[in-house]
Image (cartoon, rainbow, N blue to C red):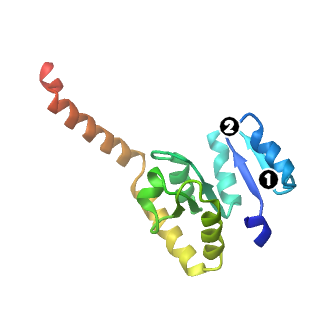
Amino acid sequence: ILNTKINCTLTHIGEDFHQGEIQKKVIEMGLTDKVKFVGLIANDKLPEYYHDADILLHTSLYESQAVVVNEAMASGLLVCGTRVGLLADLTDTCCLTVNPGDAEGLAEIVLRLISDTSMISKIRKNAYEWSTAHDLKWTVQQHRAVYELTSDKRGINNLK
């Protein structure tokens, strides 16, 4: 959809969970020059991909924290995707989302967004501030608080 409206490319990073079906679809659609499959890469190589990208499209059907989303936002990368997990929590302030499976809607928000530089700046700023405030230390503290509350309710802390 995006390719019919703007000159763009898609870089897919990660495992192939569909045994080559996506690559076959790309060939059938005549998009081999527009889609690059990188496969798994080391975490220390991700920043160069974030730097080279304009938008992270994260289109999970379900998700929880989605570390890649937080990393992208901390890198200043604009994030759009499906309204699940972390993206559902941060939609409209730090990212833009659609319901899972709504490819047309995702293309529409990307096209609308790329022509609105003030919105891009606002979302990127909000996302960066959120990601730097909610770092690993913050996450560990939140998990620890949940574990302590749960173990207190079960009397585990009194078993010592």
Residue pointed to by mark 1: 35
Secondary structure, mark 2, is loop
Mark 2 surroundings within 10 Å by alpha-carbon count, few (fewer than 14), some (14 through 19), many (20 or more):
few
Q: Is there a contact, CB below 8 Å, between mark 1 and mark 2?
A: no
Could you tell me which residue is drawn at 46 percent across and 63 percent down? Answer: 91
Residue pointed to by mark 2: 15
Q: Taking 16 as reference, is 60 left or right?
A: left
| Image position of 96 with respect to 33: above or below | below
Could you tell me which residue is drawn at 65 percent across and 79 percent down? Answer: 115
Toward the viewer: 9 or 108?
Answer: 108
Residue 10 locus on image (x, y percent): 74, 56
Mark 1 surroundings within 10 Å by alpha-carbon count, few (fewer than 14), some (14 through 19), many (20 or more):
some
- Kind of residue indicated by mark 2: Glu
In the rendered image, the quadrant that contains the C terminus is top left
Residue 140 figure quarter:
top left
- Kind of residue indicated by mark 1: Val
Residue 99 locus on image (x, y percent): 52, 58
Could you tell me which residue is drawn at 84 percent across and 55 percent down? Answer: 31
| Image position of 58 with respect to 153: above or below | below
Q: Taking 107 as reference, is 62 left or right?
A: left
Toward the viewer: 141 or 9?
Answer: 9
How many numbered circles are shown? 2
Q: Taking 119 as reference, is 139 left or right?
A: left
Residue 156 locus on image (x, y percent): 17, 24
Could you tell me which residue is drawn at 62 percent across and 57 percent down? Answer: 57
N-terminal of the pair, mark 1 or mark 2, is 2
Q: Is residue 7 visible?
A: no
Residue 43 figure quarter:
top right
